[in-house]
Amino acid sequence: MADRDDNESSREEVISRIDRSVPHSARVWNYMVGGEDWYEVDKELVDRLMRDYPQAAGLALASRAFQVRAVRHLVREEGVLQFLDIGSGLPTADNTHQVAQRYATNARIVYVDNDPLVLLHSRALLTSTPDGSAAYVEADVRDPESVLAAAAETLDLDQPVGLMLLSMLGHIRPGPAAELVHEYTSRLASGSYLVTCDSIDDPTMMELNEHYAASGAVPYYPRSEAELAATAEGLELVDPGLLPIPLWRPDTAGDPPHDQMLQWGLVARKP
């Protein structure tokens, strides 16, 4: 009975930290990919922005599709069996562990986020296969030492790791993003991979994010091509390199919709 009361108290404490009065990036993204964990304030903002900027309507789905293709490639072609997914966001379909364990049931995954709503739903991220592992760490991406120390309880950091930083570097103010990524990759084993993508500083995206910030949401900072390239400094880019994410090893031939071209990404290997 005491454990049940403690769990309920913990849940209530997490819920009390959720601000329903302004849009939040994790909930906004969840709504954009067809999830169910959002509030009306998030829906209203997305609907308005997508009406005014239809060029960005497919970004979230394109990001998730890129994630699926990148994880599949790392597991099937490169033999990577460990993933550190930072800024994982709210659970939806094709989370990193689901994709990785689809091809290697013994894959191990650690998710990292510091959003209370993500914490509330983190159990959905822990549905690992019996011979694999999935863990959730509540931590700040800007504290690599703490993140990696916690990840080491599940992952063997002396072996290759796929570091996933998907559509989240924009939460870090301009300037330190590449340096922060280097803090992580410098501590990972040879043969590890960086997978990252983010909104590019196209004029449309810059204007959209100004309106996003005006809603009261925490500002998001699109990156230049050079800034995204800098995250992979010292690493070996996997073909076809840094480019709009629908063009990274697409599953089908043909030109992708224009509304999916405002995010760029890369996969890179640590020598």
Image (spheres, rainbow, N blue to C red):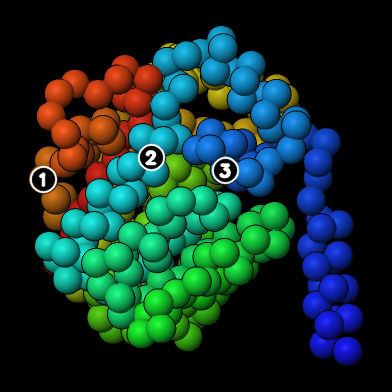
Q: Amino acid at mark 1?
A: Asp
**Residue drawn where x is 41% and y is 71% of the image:** 109
Q: Give the residue at mark 3.
A: 35
Residue 182 shown left or right of residue 206 in the figure: left
Camera-nearest label, 2 or 1: 2
Question: In the image, is residue 43 above or below residue 271?
Answer: above
All told, the count of numbered labels is 3
Q: Secondary structure at mark 3?
A: loop
Vertical comparison of 164 with 35: above or below: below
N-term-proximal mark, 3 vs 1: 3
Q: Quick check: 48 left or right of 215?
A: left
* Residue 168 location (% of width, % of height): 48, 46
* Residue under numbered circle 1: 239
Kindly report which numbered mark, 3 or 1, lies closer to the viewer in this rendering.
Answer: 3
**Badge 1, how many Cα within 10 Å: few under 14, some, many 20+?**
few
Badge 2 is on which residue?
63
Residue lying furthest top in this view?
52
Q: Nearer the viewer, mark 3 or mark 2?
A: 3
**Residues under labels 3 and 2: Cα distance?**
14 Å
Q: Type of residue at label 3? A: Gly
Q: Is residue 186 visible?
A: no
Against 85, is 240 above or below?
Answer: above
